[in-house]
Each structure stands twice: as structure tokens, then as C-alpha cells.
Image (cartoon, grey):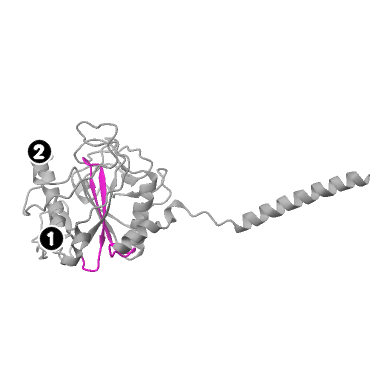
Amino acid sequence: MSIQAFRRKSFAAAVTFIAAASALVAACSQAPTIPASEQPLSKDTLSMLGRKGMDVSAPIFVRIFKEESELEVWKLRNDGRYYHFKTYPICNWSGKLGPKMRQGDKQAPEGFYAITTDQLNPNSKFHLAFNLGYPNSYDKSKYRTGRHLMVHGDCKSAGCYAMTDALIEEIYALSREALRGGQREFNVHAFPFRMTDEKLARHRKSKWYRFWRTMKQGYDYFEVHRIPPTVTVCERRYVVDVVLPEGRQVNPTARCPRFRRQRLTPFAPHPEEMQIASERITVPGPKMRRFATTAPKTFPADARQSLPPAAALGFNSQ
């Protein structure tokens, strides 16, 4: 072998060795990929939690409004009341106003639901998800059918509430941290619309009017007290704001037992807390559905809704 050929071969071997060594170093130094379900909350989100005096692991409460295509997350503060954290746009939902009735009707549920750790789905084909728990005891008492009704990502819906992937990551992380922090379950109240007197009156001829009046009890209770009401089911109807009998199971189809009502003072934040108590932060994003009656394809991403004043309590209808 000539000296020149030997030099060329040695140079090629050296280049190959350096490339292999560089690849090995890069592979060893590369951080492991964090799955979407374990992504930490962003610095901006953590900063906002801190500014609002909210602990990352504190309990949460979620409200969904179909007609407005909005999902709210509320967080518990040290005074024992829930404060608004963010309102997120629901990218898409299917069906129309009214509860889900049967498997395959592609209707998004309405009602009072509770989410446990087992209902979180880190491996959803729609990025991330949590199962609403439909059918709950009320739905079952009405012989309603269906399964796998979720809040998830991917902006596609066939009976679910679909967010964008980026937004479901934050909502999922808030849910995950609250459940890991000790919250046994968090409530999700799925409403047809913001349950103001005016909007309910607009739907007084709907076949769901009586059902929505009961839903409004839960809406009004939270508006007044900033604590989610205790909800049970008996006589095939929701009963809102009760103290459940200790150690006694309530039969969803049987006659309602004698309940005690909770006695809570209305929410009255300290003057220094008024700004946090009244602040509403709305996240921009797409809304494929605005009104169930017209269902336009797009909706301005910066649209904002202010919370209405609390209405009076006291309905007894189903």
C-alpha cells in the first residue's frame, strides 16, 4: 500500500471514529422524552397560580358551557372558596343543546359528573383525555346509554368535548396535580349554556326546560357560594345542595330521604381580594361551534364572556 493510500485510509477511519463518538456522546447526553401526560405546567401558568394565591396541588372545579363553547377551571384557595383560574375555548363538540340519551347519538352530555384518577387517560388517541363518567347514576336511572364520553384533545368530537392539544395538556396537568395532591375527585358540571334567568327563559318551550331548571340550581349555588354543591340522585332526579345521610346510600330510583340543607354564607371576599375574585382570564383559541342552533364554522378566538350576577335559589323541579 502506498503512503498516500495509507494516509487516505487512516483519515477516513479517523473521521468515522469521530462521527461515531460524537453520536454516542449526543445520545448519552440527550434527556429522556417526557410523555405528554407528565409534562409540567409552564412557567407562565405557575406564575399565574402564584399571583392568584393558588397552590398547584389544590383542588379544582370545572364548568362546561355548550352554547358558549367554553370550559372553566376554578381553584380552591386558603379561604375555602373557589376562584376562577382560566376560561378555555372548546374547539369542538357534537350534537345540540340537551343531554345525551343513547349510544351513537353523538350528543355531548349535560349533567353533574365527578372525575377520579382512574378516569384520566394518558394514552388517548385524541392526545390526552379524561372520562366524564357518563352514564352517571342519574343517567342510568333514566336508562340512558353510552360510553367513553371525554374531554380530550385533537379538536374532533363525536359526543365529546374536544380541545386543542395544547390546551388539553394544561387542563390535564391541572387535573393530574389536583388529584395527586389529595383531591379524591373533582366535579365537572356540564351545562347547555350559562344558566342566567334570561337565557333559561329563552328556552322555556324546550322539552329540557325542567331538567335545565334543576341544572340551574347547581349553577346558582356555585355563583353565590363559590363552592360546588353536593348533588345526589333519588326519584330519578338530581337533588342539589344536600347533606347526605352518614353511612346511608341513596337509591337513585327510590323515594328521596329527608335531607338536611347546608348552611353556608354567601361568598364575600375581603376587599383586598376583590381583584382576584372578579378577574376573568380567557385563553384565545378556535371555537368550531358557537350556537347549537346555527353552528357557524368559526368563532372569534378573542371573544370573552363575563360572568352574570348570581340568581336566586330555590327551584324544586326535576
In the image, taking residue 27 as reference, residue 56 lies left or right, namely left
Residue 129's x, y, as percent?
36, 48
Residue 76's x, y, as percent?
25, 63
Q: Which residues are magenta?
A: 52-80
User: On the image, which quarter does residue 106 sit in?
Assistant: top left
Q: Is 80 placed above or below 102 here? A: below
Question: Of the residues shown, which amino acid type is indicated by label 2?
Answer: Arg
Q: Residue at x 13, y 60 (%)?
A: 242
Residue depth check, mark 2 versus mark 1: number of the one nearer the observer: 2
In the image, taking residue 151 as reference, residue 308 lies left or right, namely left
Q: Is residue 110 visible?
A: yes
* Residue annotated with mark 2: 202
Question: Of the residues shown, which amino acid type is indicated by label 1?
Answer: Val
Which is more toward the observer, 195 or 182? Answer: 195
What element does badge 2 sit on? helix
Q: Is 128 placed above or below 230 here? A: above
Q: Label 2: how many residues lie within 10 Å, few (<14), some (14-19) or many (20+)?
A: few
User: On the image, which quarter does residue 265 sit in?
Assistant: bottom left
Q: Quick check: is 72 in the magenta stretch?
A: yes
Q: Is residue 1 visible?
A: no
Disc 2 vs disc 1: Cβ atoms closer than 8 Å?
Answer: no
Q: Label 1: how many residues lie within 10 Å, few (<14), some (14-19) or many (20+)?
A: some
Give the Cα distance between marks 2 and 1: 29 Å
The circle drawn on residue 255 is: none
Which is more toward the observer, 133 or 271? Answer: 271
* Residue annotated with mark 1: 242
Which is more toward the observer, 121 or 192? Answer: 192
Q: Quick check: is 57 in the magenta stretch?
A: yes
Q: Residue at x 23, y 45 (%)?
A: 304
Residue 173's x, y, as percent?
37, 56
